[in-house]
């Protein structure tokens, strides 16, 4: 039997021969040392390449994760729903924010305006008294609520008087205190819708450089407006809180 | 749509097991990690997009390799390296045929040497060797994947292996002397 062309031995090793040719080569290799040697070499090379090349380069875990993420099926409806929900929430927040901001600012601005008008007025107060036991009864019957005035004996503050005031069409008390050369307005209103947007916690702002501090305490809304320093405002607010205990 | 989701799940199930071998093949073609990653990523993106045109039941693996290979061909380094493909086999230096006892030869060649010899092959030959010996594809599959006649697959394979033997022989002899 003549030796097959080298290409045939390669095809034999690559498992590409027909059953008939395959059988023929197998028989030939059993009897021809030269072809058997070539086949053995070819097989070794093939296996060597397979071993050396098959896992020569492995993708990094990071890269694998990246591909996995990109291939993972996305549930489009829930994804869309999530997006719609996020947009809706964002919209509500933006609209509420836009709506609330001016309103809460408005209430505090009104208080600031009232304070400024008192400073400018020739008759700043309706009831002139340094005695809290005079001022408080003056408001009785004028306001739908009552409040306590602080004891100022051991403080730098003194009571100048009080007047009726109105914020957003509802009545409240405006008390004027003095500290050194400054005047401080304390507004006391029934807490409610008008102030709801400020929030119940203490809040500070600087309106036209006036120090404005507001808080809610058991149904009453307190707003302090002054041009004195914030430490004074804090100590006055402490006195007012203490008066309600 | 539920069809989309089912399709995506089928694609994931078929494509993820091919990630490591595809990456290996890409690295062998491109020669470096960055390009290999780009190739594989682009392959997955293209395949995912085109999966609706893929006919289930046909050869998914060959389909993925074909996308990868086409992506490589149109990449910058692919264009550069595959030039040798056009002027066919003539440009490739033929090693002299010798009758060395090859069984002895390859017992001495370690994996690193085989890898280096493989790197020295022109890409047009290297890819055929890899598809045949590593991916164990048939001549017919390779012919379809690469887009050449089976006869060309066989001749490239034969030349590539001869070059490999010659390179390894040089290394072994070089190491000996």
Image (tube, coloured by chain):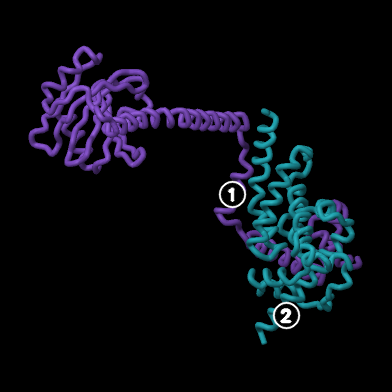
Chain colours: A purple, B cyan
> At 34% across and 38% down in the image, what residue appears?
A205
**Is residue A129 shown left or right of residue A5?**
left
Quadrant of residue A226 within the rendered picture:
top left
**Across the whole image, how many numbered discs are drawn on residues?**
2
Q: Residues within 10 Å of mark 2 (few under 14, many from 20)?
A: few
Quarter holding the N terminus of chain A is: bottom right
Q: Nearer the viewer, residue A115 or B166?
A: A115
Q: Nearer the viewer, mark 1 or mark 2?
A: 1
| SS under mark 2 | helix
> At 60% across and 45% down in the image, what residue appears?
A68
Residue annotated with mark 2 = B170
- Vertical position of residue A127 compared to residue A184: above or below: above
**Is residue B20 shown left or right of residue B80?**
left
Residue A225, image x and y in percent? Answer: 28, 34
* Residue located farthest toward the top when viewing the structure as drawn: A141
**Is residue A137 shown left or right of residue A107?**
left
Task: Find residue A66 and name its label.
Answer: 1
Callout 1 and callout 2 share a chain? no
> At 35% across and 38% down in the image, what residue appears?
A207
């Amino acid at each position: 039997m003549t030796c097959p062309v080298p290409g045939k031995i390669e095809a034999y090793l690559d498992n590409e021969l027909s059953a008939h040719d395959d059988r023929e080569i197998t028989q030939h290799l059993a009897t021809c040392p030269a072809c058997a040697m070539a086949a053995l070499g070819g097989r070794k090379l093939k296996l060597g390449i397979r071993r050396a090349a098959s896992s020569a380069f492995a993708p990094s875990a990071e890269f694998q994760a990246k591909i996995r993420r990109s291939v993972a099926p996305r549930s489009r409806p829930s994804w869309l729903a999530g997006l719609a929900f996020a947009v809706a929430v964002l919209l509500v927040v933006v609209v509420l924010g836009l709506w609330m901001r001016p309103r809460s600012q408005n209430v505090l601005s009104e208080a600031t305006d009232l304070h400024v008008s008192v400073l400018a007025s020739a008759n700043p107060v309706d009831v002139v008294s340094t005695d809290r036991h005079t001022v408080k009864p003056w408001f009785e019957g004028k306001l739908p609520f009552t409040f306590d005035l602080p004891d100022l004996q051991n403080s730098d503050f003194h009571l100048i008087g009080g007047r009726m005031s109105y914020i957003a069409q509802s009545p409240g008390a405006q008390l004027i205190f003095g500290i050194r050369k400054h005047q401080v307005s304390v507004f006391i209103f029934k807490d409610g819708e008008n102030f709801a947007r400020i929030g119940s916690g203490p809040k500070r702002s600087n309106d036209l450089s006036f120090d404005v501090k507001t808080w809610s305490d058991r149904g009453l809304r307190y707003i302090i407006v002054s041009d004195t320093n914030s430490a004074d405002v804090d100590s006055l607010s402490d006195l007012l809180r203490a008066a309600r205990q | 749509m539920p069809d989309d989701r089912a399709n995506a799940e089928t694609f994931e199930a078929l494509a993820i097991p091919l990630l490591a071998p595809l990456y290996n093949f890409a690295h062998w073609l491109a020669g470096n990690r960055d390009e290999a990653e780009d190739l594989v990523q682009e392959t997955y993106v293209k395949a995912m997009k085109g999966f609706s045109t893929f006919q289930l039941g046909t050869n998914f693996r060959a389909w993925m390799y074909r996308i990868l290979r086409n992506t490589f061909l149109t990449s910058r380094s692919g264009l550069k390296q595959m030039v040798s493909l056009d002027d066919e086999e003539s440009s490739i230096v033929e090693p002299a045929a010798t009758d060395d006892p090859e069984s002895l030869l390859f017992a001495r060649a370690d994996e690193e040497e085989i890898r280096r010899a493989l790197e020295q092959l022109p890409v047009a030959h290297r890819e055929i060797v890899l598809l045949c010996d590593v991916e164990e594809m048939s001549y017919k599959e390779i012919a379809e994947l690469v887009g050449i006649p089976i006869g060309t697959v066989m001749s490239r394979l034969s030349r590539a292996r001869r070059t490999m033997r010659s390179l390894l022989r040089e290394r072994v002899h070089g190491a000996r002397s």
